Image: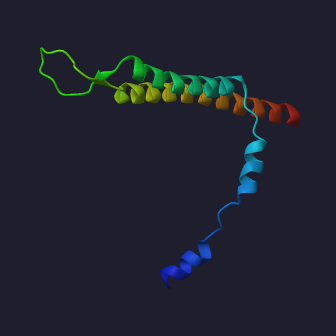
């Protein structure tokens, strides 16, 4: 047996863009998921604003000296983005769980 022949037998084509958009367009977001998406975009912008509001020292200075130059606080922005991503992912997951439970409930009511 040749490994490349096995790969050729098992190989599948990548899905076309139209089929992906068709599948995604049928998905409806519930309130929790819409809230999570909106909050993530707001927090994304707010992370950039926080990085500018609380600048970091641009040059290495001694412990007791003043900070002479400041620059954009990239680490604060990334930290805020990461925390907001986790919070929004939590809300999105709750919304997804609720939508799954709702579809299960509809299926069970239909079968009774």
Question: Which residue is farthest bottom?
Answer: 1
Name the residue rendered at 47%, 24% in the picture.
47
Q: Position of residue 85 (x, y in %)?
A: 51, 29
Does residue 94 appear anywhere in the picture? Answer: no
**Colouring scheme applied when the structure was drawn:** rainbow
The answer to which of 25 and 53 lies nearer the viewer is 53
- Location of residue 84 in the rendering, given as x and y in whole percent from the top left corner: 49, 25
Residue at x 37% of width, y 25% of height = 76
Q: Is residue 72 above or below residue 107?
A: above
Residue at (12% x, 21% y) in the render: 62
Q: Nearer the viewer, residue 87 or 52?
A: 52
Q: Is residue 15 left or right of residue 90?
A: right
Q: Is residue 29 left or right of residue 50?
A: right
How many numbered marks, from 0 up?
0
The picture places residue 77, in percent across and down from the top left corner, at 41, 27
Query: Residue 13 occupies which quadrant of the picture?
Result: bottom right
Could you tell me residue 40's position as x and y percent?
57, 27
Q: Image quadrant for the C terminus?
A: top right
Q: Is residue 65 left or right of residue 92?
A: left
| Nearer to the camera, 66 or 41 | 66
Question: Does 51 sit left or right of 22 as displayed?
Answer: left
Q: Is residue 62 visible?
A: yes
* Residue found at x 71% / y 23%: 31
């Amino acid at each position: 047996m040749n490994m490349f022949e096995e790969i050729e037998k098992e190989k599948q084509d990548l899905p076309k863009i139209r089929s992906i958009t068709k599948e995604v367009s049928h998905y409806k977001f519930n309130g929790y998921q819409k809230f999570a998406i909106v909050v993530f975009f707001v927090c994304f912008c707010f992370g950039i604003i926080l990085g500018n509001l609380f600048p970091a020292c641009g040059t290495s200075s001694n412990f007791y000296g003043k900070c002479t130059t400041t620059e954009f606080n990239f680490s604060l922005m990334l930290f805020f983005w990461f925390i907001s991503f986790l919070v929004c992912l939590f809300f999105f997951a709750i919304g997804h769980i609720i939508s799954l439970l709702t579809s299960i409930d509809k299926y069970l009511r239909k079968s009774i």
